[in-house]
Image (cartoon, helix red, strand yellow):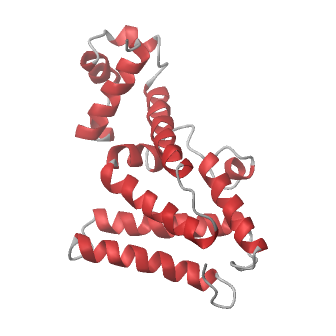
């Protein structure tokens, strides 16, 4: 049986998916869940608390995808980049909630990442350090490399959403090629494993 909290979160997720941030209000979410606005305040103190919950929900979905990646070495980064693209294209509203919502609890660079608040960034940093120890990646600060790769991939996805590519096949090919170029430029002696 679905809890009231879950009903409200599901209603918020549906409204956000259909109308975006501008359409998300406490009244609309409560009405969609079949509750009064006052009942909603028992579960979410305000709209900011609701945005935080949507963001956490998006990150939880992203963390599950990353946890399924089993490759090692540079192949892990290829699979992570593909998982990121798949998440953005197949679950765009959760992707937006995770990475684009102006939530109070949104993770901030560098403090939240250094402290390990982001499971995915900690995992990326761990894989970077492992690849560096194997001599596969340049000895640059792992967190900075993680940020560089994340910014590149998110930037390409933003361009795709803004219809800056002729077609989807072109975008996918360029996304993969650009990710591989980035990894190659950071690899030592041009080695790839």
Q: Residue 94 or 31: which is nearer the viewer?
A: 94
Does residue 139 appear left or right of residue 127 in this picture? right
Q: Position of residue 84 (x, y in %)?
A: 45, 58
At a point 57% along the width and 78% down the height, the residue shown is 183
Q: Is residue 80 left or right of residue 88?
A: right
Q: Position of residue 91 (x, y in %)?
A: 34, 47
For the C terminus, the quadrant is: bottom right
The one of 74 and 108 positioned closer to us in this rendering: 74
Q: Does 84 sit left or right of 192 as displayed?
A: left
Tally of numbered tags: 0
Residue nearest the observer in this picture, 48 or 1: 1
Relative height, residue 114 to residue 50 (above, below): below
Q: Choose top left, top right, bottom left or bottom right for residue 51.
A: top left
Is 172 situated left or right of 5 in this image? left
- Which residue is drawn at the image coordinates 31% and 17% (left, top)? 30
Residue 102 at x, y = what percent? 47, 43
Position in image of residue 1 (x %, y %)? 37, 11
Q: Residue furthest bottom?
A: 189
139 in relation to 31, above or below: below
Q: In the image, what residue occupies the spot 30% across and 19% down? A: 27
| Identity of the residue drawn at 57% across and 57% down | 70
Q: Which of the 4 image quarters holds residue 145?
A: bottom right
Spot the residue most to the right. Answer: 133
> Is residue 9 shown above or below 41?
below
């Amino acid at each position: 049986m679905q809890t009231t909290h879950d009903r409200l979160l599901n209603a918020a997720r549906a409204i956000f998916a259909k109308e975006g941030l501008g359409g998300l209000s406490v009244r609309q979410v409560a009405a969609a869940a079949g509750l009064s606005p006052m009942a909603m305040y028992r579960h979410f103190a305000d709209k900011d608390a609701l945005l935080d919950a949507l963001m956490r929900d998006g990150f939880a979905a992203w963390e599950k995808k990353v946890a399924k990646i089993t490759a090692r070495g540079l192949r892990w980064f290829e699979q992570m980049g593909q998982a990121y693209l798949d998440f953005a294209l197949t679950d765009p509203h959760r992707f937006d909630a995770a990475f684009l919502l102006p939530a109070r609890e949104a993770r901030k660079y560098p403090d939240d990442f250094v402290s390990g608040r982001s499971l995915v960034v900690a995992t990326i940093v761990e894989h970077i350090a492992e690849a560096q120890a194997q001599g596969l990646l340049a000895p640059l600060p792992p967190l900075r490399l993680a940020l560089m790769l994340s910014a590149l991939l998110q930037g390409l996805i933003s361009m795709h959403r803004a219809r800056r590519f002729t077609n989807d096949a072109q975008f996918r090919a360029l996304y993969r090629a650009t990710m591989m170029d980035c990894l190659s430029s950071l690899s030592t002696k041009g080695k790839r494993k």
